[in-house]
Image (spheres, rainbow, N blue to C red):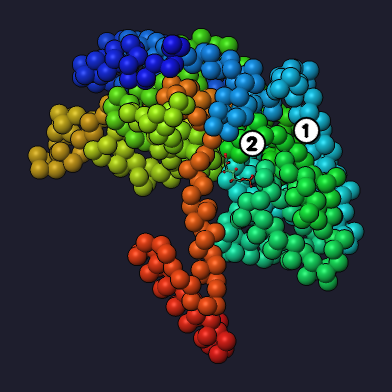
Amino acid sequence: MEANQKPFTQRRAWKALAAHRQDWKTHLRDLFAADPKRGERMTAEAAGLFLDYSKNCITDETLSLLVQLAEESGLRARIDAMFRGEKINSTENRAVLHVALRAPRGASIMVDGENVVPQVHAVLDQMADFARQVRSGSWKGHSGKPIKNVVNIGIGGSDLGPVMAYEALKYYSDRSLTFRFVSNIDGTDFAEAVQDLDAAETLFIVSSKTFTTLETMTNAGTARDWLLQRFKGDEKAVAKHFAAVSTNAAAVAEFGIDTANMFGFWDWVGGRYSMDSAIGLAAMLAIGPDHFRGMLNGFHQMDEHFRTAPFECNLPVLMGLLAIWYNNFFGVPTIAVLPYEQYLKRLPAYLQQLTMESNGKRVTLDGAETDYQTGPIYWGEPGTNGQHSFYQLIHQGTRLIPCDFIAFIDPLHPLGRHHDMLLANVLAQAEALAFGKTLEQVRSEGVPDWLAPHKVFEGNRPSNMILAQRLTPETLGSLVALYEHCVFTQGAIWNIDSFDQWGVELGKVLAQRIIPELESEATPSLRHDSSTNHLIQRCRRLKAKTESAGSAGSVR
Ligand code: G6Q
């Protein structure tokens, strides 16, 4: 029996960690007092990122047991299998090769006997060529005007990556172009995105791996109608105002998009791992091909670190193991990601999908139900905003919430003392969480007894500090790859498939059943549960009321 086939909770290191946790009484204050070099020792650095993990509730013993758990779980073999192009996404029988998307020209990664790296670079070159035409104004719309607005239509993995990368790297973007991202089936999203745009200067990128997704195809159809309205129904306009990113050439052609303006990718790229494939086209249009390649280089540096570094100093492995330590041994269900960088405001939303769609699984690779917790809930907001809202609970609430702080040494906008204040805040938060403030300290400040307990910070609240010199395309690539491989580490140890997403299916199927029940003129015979039936009836009744009021001319 291979090591990772042994049930998780039966592994030697798991049992040792469980016993170690039982005896755990140590406060971070004591750990730091006992080891004056702890804050320098418990650090690691790679691909432009520095990780200080010293403010975690761990000792050297904890770390060595966690590394042992990774080894007993076959993490090394699983990493090698991914990089070899094996079909480790077993429930979909697919290779998992986002690492090939950033492999340098000349590298070789085989899938089914074929080196995929040349195809990757052929698409990157095609994207770069298109980006140069649009950015230089040589790509003309149907009426001969250059493109000024780019609207990406996609959802989930075909939206969250491009929008996050666009926001994160806005500093490097061409400000003469306007970018919008439409994802929601809610018509408001489309209406607001185009309300101030001239269709003659607008390019839509329909980003959909399958080109069948309800939201994306509905929004793309609405975009087509909006464009054709401007050009009085002249279908020839579509070729000049639509590009597609997809694996489904037939559906792209059927929609009316010239497949010369289609950018392909492959079934071995999962949606939430696709921001560095052609799905990143909108981001490339914004920042230009050179910066996009810089971002890919950052990803690749972190890939190489993950693939080769010993677990003890491997950033994604360390972060994955720490997440497991809290999740499985402290019963902690959540991790906050707190970037002290306004440009990273969409990073938490992006990471929500990356982490929770990947590791929100309750069945192992063998189909057995887990008897342990898997994927924690990731969430967050940029600092310092969060400090004035939910940090209260992190500091003084009853729950333990490990935090990942992310900060940069150099500001992109050096305005007065802003950046020193920002950095001081992130360092202070980590310090306050770890060391707190004792009752004695509070009393010594003359606080009356009745108020003192409210002012105590118990501390001992763990955090990671991720520092980089400056937010660049390279550091963004390294940072995203860090979390991708951190998720991989967790999934490998839990023995789950981090690359499928069956849990999104049921709701989609049920929605398809409910759409006609809401829309039909005749009263449908409903066969749901009593709550769903009642809600559908209520929606129909109130919708009809609005419609009849509208036809009577009383609606704004
Ligand atoms: C990501 C998921 C999912 C997917 C969207 C969009 O890993 O698979 O979020 O990206 O459902 O799918 P399409 O790109 O096929 O439209």
Q: Nearer the viewer, residue 186 or 520?
A: 520
Q: Is mark 2 within 8 Å of ligand 1?
A: yes
**Few, some or many C-alpha atoms within 10 Å of disc 1 (few <14, some 14-19, many ≥20)?**
many
Q: How many marks?
A: 2
Report whether 213 appears left or right of 422.
Answer: right
Q: Is residue 100 visible?
A: yes
Residue tagged 2: 274
Q: Amino acid at mark 2?
A: Ser
Q: Residue at x 45, y 71 (%)?
A: 525
Where does residue 446 sit, x and y in percent of width and height? 14, 36
Residue 131 vs 410, above or below: the answer is below
Residue tagged 1: 124
Residue 344 is drawn in which quadrant?
A: top right
Residue 372 is drawn in which quadrant?
A: top left
Report whether 220 appears left or right of 462.
Answer: right
Marks 2,1: beta carbons within 8 A: no
Q: Is mark 1 within 8 Å of ligand 1?
A: no
Q: Residue at x 38, y 69 (%)?
A: 534
Where does residue 179 sit, x and y in percent of width and height? 69, 51
Q: Quadrant of ligand 1?
A: top right
Q: Residue at x 44, y 78 (%)?
A: 541
Q: Nearer the viewer, residue 495 or 428?
A: 495
For numbered disc 1, what is the local secondary structure?
A: helix
